[in-house]
Amino acid sequence: MVNAKHLATFILGAAAGVALHKYLKTDEGEKMVEDLKSKAGDLKTEAEDSLEKIPEYFEQLKNQGSDTLKKYSPEVEKILQDLLDNIRGKGGSAPTATPPTP
């Protein structure tokens, strides 16, 4: 059902479209379109450059994280290895459960 509100919205939208079309045909409008195209091209190039750098960034992040972990917690590697050994059943230092005394 079309009511007066919908009709008014449609007419205002159409009028705005006509006004924009006329503005874009002026020298100033054409300059604005060219500026927008140029900025869009710059953004596209920047995005493509960023995509190419992602693998390098994550590799650097991984290395820095590993270095930081080793620097601030040198025994973490040993603790993790002991934990893995215990889980796999290779470690002899895992606590053993004693049966309860009746």
Image (cartoon, helix red, strand yellow):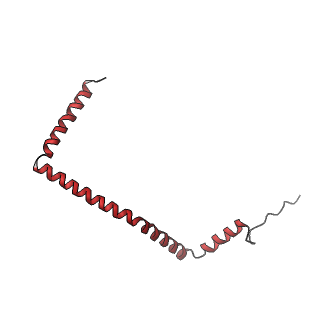
- Residue 47, how many percent across, how many down? 33, 60
Q: Determine the image quadrant of residue 76.
A: bottom right
Nearest the viewer among 102 and 85 is 85
Q: Determine the image quadrant of residue 1.
A: top left
Which residue is at a point 65% across and 71% down the rendered structure image?
A: 81
- Residue 56, how many percent across, how many down? 42, 69
In the image, taking residue 17 as reference, residue 78 lies left or right, namely right
Q: Give the answer, above or below, for where 28 lies relative to 3.
A: below
Q: How many marks?
A: 0
Nearest the viewer among 98 and 43 is 43
- Residue 36, how many percent across, how many down? 21, 54
Q: Determine the image quadrant of residue 4.
A: top left
Which residue is at a point 14% across and 50% down the rendered structure image?
A: 30
In the image, taking residue 18 as reference, residue 4 lies left or right, namely right
- Residue 88, how many percent across, how many down? 71, 66
Please identify the quadrant where the C terminus is shown.
Answer: bottom right
Which residue is at a point 20% across and 33% down the rendered structure image?
A: 12
Nearest the viewer among 40 and 74 is 40
In the image, taking residue 10 as reference, residue 56 lies left or right, namely right
Which residue is at a point 34% across and 64% down the rendered structure image?
A: 49
In the image, taking residue 22 as reference, residue 83 lies left or right, namely right
Q: Give the answer, above or below, for where 41 lies relative to 18.
A: below
Q: Residue furthest left?
A: 27
